[in-house]
Amino acid sequence: MLWFVCLFNYADRQAIFSVFPLLRKELALTPIQLGIVGSSFMWMYALAGPLAGWMSDRVSPRKVIVGALAFWSVVTAGTALCHSYGILVFFRTLGGLGEAFYFPAAMALIGAYHGAATRSRAMALHQSSVYAGTIAGGAMSAFIAERHGWRSSFTIFGALGVVLAVVLLFCLRQPPRVAGDEPRENPLLHFAHGVREVLRNGRIVLMIAVFMGANFVAVVFLTWLPTFLLEKFHMSLSNAGFSSTAYLQAASVLGVLLGGWLADRFAAKRAGGRQLTQAIGLLCGVPFLFLTGWSITVLGLIVSMTGFGFFKGIYDANIWASLYDVVPVEKRGVAAGVMNSLGWLGGGFAPVLIAAAAQRFGLSACISATSVIYLCLAVVMMGLAAKLAKRASR
């Protein structure tokens, strides 16, 4: 059930990027304004993250998930009513607010069902819906937009999300005891204390820093790859929407499933096994990232995107499972919220920064330059894995 919720979570946020060329023409937007349309979602998503995580520790995750799904689906449908730049940014911001509440609650619910032995595999299976949703949002919105206008896809995705929320209202259940079921005194004090405790843990801070960098790279691809394919390879809108998501995200599904399986095996044999798996994914993704920007043929581009997507999936499989290795059960919700918040805050600057840099250096160079970020992140994650292994051996 959560797999389908997460699919809509990503389809609804990705749909707009494939129709950027239509928005630019109809609303007379500049590349920087388009970047802000993309960033407004992520900035609100980031700001609401700690509150969302804290609420997941205090309120039934089931209620948070169903309520968030219903809210952001209504907002997605409402995006079809936008006729000006300001209103479009407003609705994107509301979408970020609604979607921010999903991931911490979903991770808390999955974490309650799965212990260390199966955590990576369970979360990896859930993570595969991220890629399916990205493909659905990117490809379907472009396909529908070419035939019925860009507004129709938002109406369809929003309506389907509301239907799913009604179904989950009756079907989604939770374990008898989930961290956060019992009320606590001084909620604001508890929230501040939880955030402070999370940020005082150096291992968590390093994971958050890596997550910020990885999200920055991911958002560059999510936001500007459809436009890059349209302009450099002269693809149609629907072909660019499909190609910018399908190869990369489909490969990520395979990578995330392998990454979950590998991490559970590594973690059973050594401390830091999940973090080591993430480092391998980041390091192996570096050459494919570089080649994506400089490919001169469609075949070379597809191979590069597929390779990057596969190794990105290996990293992604263990984002939350690695975090839960070093966070007490009662702090998981707020830790996931803080990490999600800061991670997307970093990613939120990507659409605007790349739009500005591309005007001077071109999109090809900007996309290839993200390989340097991945290399630095791999080094940091390898160091963290080694530190965890050394600490456990004492």
Image (cartoon, grey):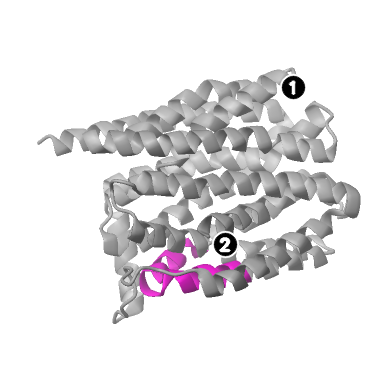
Image: magenta residue range: 48-70
What residue is at 76 percent from the left and 48 percent from the top? 140
Neighbour tally class for label 2: few under 14, some 14-19, many 20 plus, Cα within 10 Å: many
Give the quadrant of the C terminus.
Answer: top left
Residue 153 lies within the magenta run? no
Q: Which residue is mark 1?
A: 298
Q: x, y percentage for residue 105? A: 44, 64
Give the farthest residue toward the front. Answer: 171
Look at the numbered discs 1 and 2 and tell me whether their residues touch, using CB distance below 8 Å.
no
Q: x, y percentage for residue 364? A: 69, 26
As displayed, is residue 23 above or below residue 215? below
Neighbour tally class for label 1: few under 14, some 14-19, many 20 plus, Cα within 10 Å: few
* Residue type beneath disc 1: Val
By secondary structure, the bulk of the magenta-drawn segment is best described as: helix
**As rendered, which of 227 and 192 lies closer to the eye?**
227
**Residue 246 bears which disc, if any?**
none
Q: x, y percentage for residue 212? A: 47, 44
Q: Which residue is mark 2?
A: 99
Q: Secondary structure at mark 2?
A: helix
Q: Is residue 360 left or right of residue 98?
A: right
Residue 164, image quadrant: bottom right
